[in-house]
Amino acid sequence: MSETYNIGLGNNDSETRKTAESDYVSFWDNQAKALSWFSPWTKTLDWQPPFAKWFVGGTINASFNALDVHQNTRSEKTAILWEGEDGESRTLTYGDMFSQVQKFANVLKSLGVQKGDRVTIYLPMVPELPIAMLACARIGATHTVVFSGFSASSIRDRIDDSKSKIVITADGGYRRGKVVKLKEVIDEAIQNFDFVEHVVVLERTKNEIKMSSKDKLWNDLMKNASESCTAEKLDSDHPLYILYTSGTTGKPKGVLHGTGGYLTHLHSTFKWAFDIKDSDVFFCTADIGWVTGHSYVVYAPLLHGATEVMYEGAPDFPDASRMWDILQKYKVTIFYTTPTALRMFMKFGDDIPNSFDLSTLRLLGTVGEPINPEVWKWYYKIIGKEKCPIIDTWWQTETGGMLISPLPGLETIPLKPGSGTRPIPGVNIEVVDENGASVEPNTKGYLVIKNPWPGMLLTLWGDDEKYKTVYWSKYENCYYPGDYALKDDDGYLWLLGRADDVLKVAGHRIGTAELESCIVSHNDVAESAVCGIPDEVKGEVIIAFVVLKQGVSKSDILEKQLIEKIRNDIGAIATPKQIYFVSKLPKTRSGKIIRRLLKAVANGEKIGDVSTLEDGAAVSEVQQSVEDLKRSMNT
Ligand code: WTA
């Protein structure tokens, strides 16, 4: 039996859960009424498995709900407290955001952007990033934000797949005191892309850049832009954004989110999970390049008219006290971060956070990976001073918003370190076996979601078939997220990591297939397989096994080339910790790599009996390749 912590905020609304259980469709219907709609919907849910349309016939606008709705009551209220990595700070009120977003929406229109067009945004964590996103949303353009750590070739693929007409970038961004030259990356990424009509360049670092006829400076365009731009009335399922994410196939998938359902999900979960009040100062450390930043830095806090901190740089720059310094400076009340960040802070020792005044904190959260109980307890004790509930929130790029989390804004339940507790109201989540039958309590199985929810992805951009096979083919009419889980005797859910070939390195999602196809595209490589091994700080790190072509021998130069290639093709986040050159990979007769064995070898675990291998693998060959792997790991 694991320890429980009886800490809550005193909220006890059992009605919400009851209504949700009796009829999830009318439950969400009611939740959606908290938003401002131009015209009401005629049907709450049109469910043609696996395609769900929420609030059919209703028209809405995300930018209107984030900004216009607050102008009478909160135009002077701070929306964003921005802290630059270099210590610079900016404060933007709801009024400032409103005028900037309208101006930039007019800029986009003047560049020919129309409803339905895609716009790629490759910006550092500066206020112009949410401004650009909300400007797109205002005119019905679909934004596709690419994390500013991705390489030219990754961005090229994403711009090409989305056929973005406009790219928005900056001259550079700061990372650990250095300038990352973003505009140069875009110049390389869009070579020969005639469909990209303009590149808008924000001057952030003032480093030298080459300007071509397509390029326009953000400030020049904004100078003469009108401050008034009416928000478009968009259908509820109008595509708000595409966010590319790694999966089990070589190519990143464009997860497509709509508007009305997505916003409803965010509005409700933000209220339930964070118990948001007008007086709160919210701080989510996620980069907007990932889904957590889209949902809980940009849309959810602004829907609620909240005040939030947005930080530009690395959490430990210039030193290990930076995060606590920000919390103290802005009197943060709600802090939402990742287990990786917490493990790093924990390693730096207790004295650092103990030397700051963190007494304004009242609620803590984590997301992105399983949190180890000892890290949870450290967070609870050292950061929260045993007075803040911790919400461990489970969700995915595809789910749009949280699906499993304690909800202190709604109810008080005992917390267990390492468990996300229960699903949010209005979603039915189970743990099942290979055949889809519910497993006994305390048994590891697969997590499945048994009904559609409002934040659910619409589809994969341009690929309905892949959408069906990736998420809906393992179990009939159930969404399969690809995670292992178990339910304990109290019905608490414990998320146990990925069940597929997706790695979570420092909370970033990396598909093994994408990485393998990058390595194999090197001329000297015949085959490759990558897997994750546990890491004290990053959760897991990448190990790559590489089989070279006949006649090629391993060398330091080759290793360097491969690492360079991964950095160039994908980005630094996908760099393996170690590359092992081996002569053979363990395979089945039909040629499938036996990842189970690979992982076991990489993790130094006992291999066990290989005579009962699936798919009739040749036992002796497999044994030999396992020996080979082991040997190569020791040399
Ligand atoms: C993992 C991030 C355990 C999970 C919002 C999921 C978690 C993947 C948790 C999605 C958590 C996310 N506990 N695991 N609280 N939150 N995950 O798309 O494996 O970057 O499938 O979305 O992260 O990652 P993504």
Image (spheres, grey):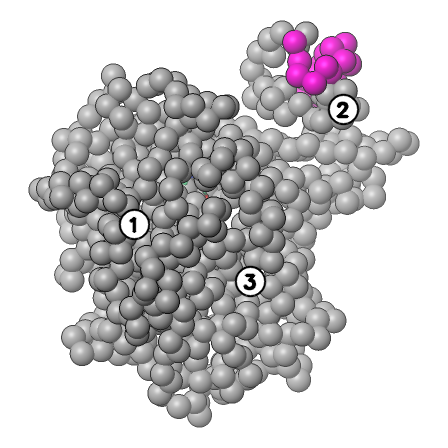
Q: Earlier in the sequence, mark 2 or mark 3?
A: 3
The label shown at residue 245 is none
Residue 506 percent coordinates (x, y): 47, 41
Question: Is label 2 in a helix, a strand or a loop?
Answer: loop
364 relative to 333, above or below? above
Magenta region, residue range: 612-635
Most common secondary structure along the magenta stretch: helix
Q: Earlier in the sequence, mark 1 or mark 3?
A: 1
Mark 1–mark 3 Cα distance, whole angstroms, equals: 47 Å
Amino acid type, label 3? Val
Amino acid type, label 1? Val
Q: Report which residue position mark 1 lands on.
A: 25
Is the shortest distance between ligand 1 and the CB of mark 1 under 8 Å? no
Question: Is label 1 in a helix, a strand or a loop?
Answer: helix
130 relative to 246, above or below? below
Whether residue 408 is visible, yes or no, is no
Q: Report which residue position mark 2 lands on.
A: 590
Residue at 17% from the left image edge and 31% from the top image edge? 414
Residue 172 percent coordinates (x, y): 53, 68
Q: Quadrant of the N terminus?
A: top left
- Disc nearest the viewer among 2 and 3: 2
